[in-house]
Image (cartoon, coloured by chain):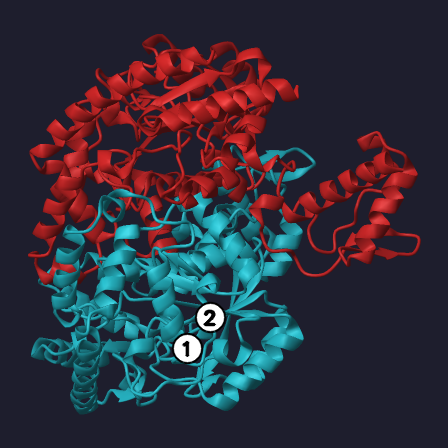
Chain colours: A red, B cyan
Amino acid sequence: MARSNTRIQAVMHEIQSRIAARIYGPGARLPSVRAQAQVMGLSVSTVVEAYERLMAQGVLTSRPGSGFYVEGPVAPLALTEIGPKLDRAVDPLWVSRQTLEAGDAMLRPGCGWLPPALLYESGMRRALRTLARASPLELAEYASPQGQLPLRQLLSRRMLAHDIEAPPQQIMLTESGTQAIDLICRFLLEPGDTVLVDDPCYFNFHALLKAHRAQVVGVAYTPQGPDIEKFEAALQAHAPRLYITNSGIHNPTGATLSAVTAHRVLKLAERAGLTIIEDDIFADFEHSPAPRLAALDGLARVIHIGSFSKTLSASLRCGFVAARPDWIDSLIDLKIATSFAGGRLAADVTHAALTDSGYRKHMEALRIHLAQGMHTTLSRLAKLGIEPWHTPKAGMFIWCQLPDGVDSAALARRCLQQQVVLAPGNAFSPNQNAGSFLRFNVAQSTDDRVFSVLAGALREERQHR
Amino acid sequence: MARSNTRIQAVMHEIQSRIAARIYGPGARLPSVRAQAQVMGLSVSTVVEAYERLMAQGVLTSRPGSGFYVEGPVAPLALTEIGPKLDRAVDPLWVSRQTLEAGDAMLRPGCGWLPPALLYESGMRRALRTLARASPLELAEYASPQGQLPLRQLLSRRMLAHDIEAPPQQIMLTESGTQAIDLICRFLLEPGDTVLVDDPCYFNFHALLKAHRAQVVGVAYTPQGPDIEKFEAALQAHAPRLYITNSGIHNPTGATLSAVTAHRVLKLAERAGLTIIEDDIFADFEHSPAPRLAALDGLARVIHIGSFSKTLSASLRCGFVAARPDWIDSLIDLKIATSFAGGRLAADVTHAALTDSGYRKHMEALRIHLAQGMHTTLSRLAKLGIEPWHTPKAGMFIWCQLPDGVDSAALARRCLQQQVVLAPGNAFSPNQNAGSFLRFNVAQSTDDRVFSVLAGALREERQHR
């Protein structure tokens, strides 16, 4: 009886999830009880009971002799209702909210960014004082639709240092790296389109692509970039519209794209007519630059995006897109339509801070600090039997495997009770095959309590099993 | 022959516009030549010729005996290709870009905002200096997902002054008023849904709703609010999902909603299950507050949004949404997914500037300044025979009719050649029935040259006709 109840609830959840994802629109006729039962491998009576409970809840309605229909107006888009019901510990949105909302008492070794004290505080203070003396135009007028030219010129020169030829007229400023990707998705995607991502990848990609109602397909990531055979197979099997990746330093693995993989990815993309978003927000963390897809491709099918939330300040919102000139023009229209104008003040503060002579020194010191943190964190994790999947050349992330197949979501729940926020592997994995992985941020793992809590939780989790 | 060519091009444009709007997706079969001809009231041979030219351009393909199909992969979303081909002078996106891009030499009586010198410059300078001394957390950390609590508390108190009960937990900060509306559209709209707007209304609503592929229906606006009979008829004819309006001071007409109209709109909305977005960005310009839909409704079906781009600074991006608690929760998820975190710095600067004792004085002085500007501009326009549709109680806008049926788009083109940017009526009119109207901004109409150029252009336009 209890088991049958679980099955009924599974059917109910499946249907509600499809209504939330608007696969079943308002007034839509549901598959027949018999067909649904067959597809789900359940008995007809289980499905009937689920349909009837949903009728009682006002979700469905029936017409005699004609079947079951979705009742009422379309449901608002609730991202948490779309897709498989995830354990909260690995739900991408919940992980984002948990990290963003964590109070000061929390330790956040799973956090995706640096503690504020490591960002460019002195440069921010100087830039704000400079802006306080700026003209009324800078203080109070809207930004130009494409974004302030001095910052676009600076970005153009910075990209050239990575061999990316992007003149200022091929650059548009946005309010964040995420908004840059979102505008590109609005521009290129249709609901139902397939998008390739790395498995594992930055977890907010899942949430963003859900909001665009895209089908997400994960391709296994290797220490040199995506697994080329699997990448090719995915292109053939799914005809994706878009591939989103990080080249410089990959989130969450810390790996870097190799030249040969970059070249192969591009060749396959050309053959398949695939567009690629190269998210380069970790560019300034590299000691020596990895190859960039946008450099090889010349911004033909690669769209290059970035921001300074990870090095300068996350409290400022300023990102950018570099792409084909005709695409930039359409992206500007979409930006005006959906956010009117970018943040001029944010762009001016960013420009002032980046051109401040101190930024280069700040980044040099930060890279050394992170390299030391990487070394220390790797050895402290090793003592707990936690091994890196790959030793990153730079950046803040280590992608680690837990010993003895310990489940990282279960571990994350235990640590959360002790005010330590972890980032469990499956939050990053579209195929949910990183259940024994964790992402560590070396800059957020300096407190001894991170490791003592982790040791205790590991011990408990092993005993529990 | 020439006329038939025009018809062929009309058919071609119609089809390309539907492909751009993705009404005809990639691979979709087009209506038969016979059906298309009947719908458009044209001859079969005209439609055949149009289809064949589109085949020659690689837009369509044919399969013998089976009809015409949309060729190739889906086109990226180009907003300018969707909908009827508008005269550039009245294309909402073009008007936005033209105003945002206008150089310093341009006079902008058609602009939708104040010149920067009238915004709260001294308060911005003080707020930036204060922020330059803030903690690393304020300078460099992400905002909380819902937005900084002190500003939400302040907004809650401010709304209470308009009888709107919105506790801080029912408020979410956004990066702009436009982003607030965009997130609500993501949350509530399906492609193809119908949205009611006022005719005339703020022109960027058209562009925003195009990006969501909504059907826009305009309801005639009166000096007391929407025309209630037409509003009721539109509800019955189109079953819209949403109605977007301004209550305080209406853009572009400067009219204010009356209590009786507000009550009727809400009663009709309740009966029809309609959600209303009340865009209140001009709230602080009112001498005495008009009734608010959100106040009467208690935020049940009304979503109240606002920002400070029009009174404080447009260079800062900070807006807000007040709505039902369960909707706020889903909107936060959508905000994280599509822009990750709001601008903490922008929220902190906004909070500092609004709580500065000078803001109230700044607004008092600004309201007096605008009242004087309104008086002067009305009398200068009257000398040219340009009459207001309605005399606004407050704000910066006058909605005017040109004498002798002069076409405002033609006039705008003439003035643009002389570096004067006007806002022609049909850019605001979903039904394109404001061809002899212009919107003037009294704060941008202080230069004598505005009126001399206008007088000259009016004279030329009359002679031309």
CB atoms at circles 1 and 2 under 8 Å apart? yes
What residue did someone put label 1 on? B160
Gap between marks 1 and 2, in whole Å? 7 Å
Chain letter for the residue marked with disc 2 in the picture? B
**Of the pair A436 and A153, the residue shown nearer to us:** A436
Q: Position of residue A404 (x, y in %)?
A: 58, 11
**Of the pair A106 and A76, the residue shown nearer to us:** A106
Label 1 CA crowd tier, 10 Å (few <14, some 14–19, many 20+) = some
B75 up-or-down from A335: above or below = above
Chain letter for the residue marked with disc 1 in the picture? B
Tell me if residue A163 can be seen: no
Q: Position of residue B337 (x, y in %)?
A: 46, 43
Query: In the structure shown, which secondary structural element does the residue marked by tag 1 occupy?
Result: helix
What residue did someone put label 2 on? B166
Label 2 CA crowd tier, 10 Å (few <14, some 14–19, many 20+) = many
Q: Position of residue A338 (x, y in %)?
A: 39, 54
A65 up-or-down from B459: above or below = above
Q: Amino acid at mark 2?
A: Ala
Residue at 20 percent across and 70 percent down: it is B356
Q: Amino acid at mark 1?
A: Leu
A89 up-or-down from A142: above or below = above
Residue at 28 percent across and 16 percent down: it is A290
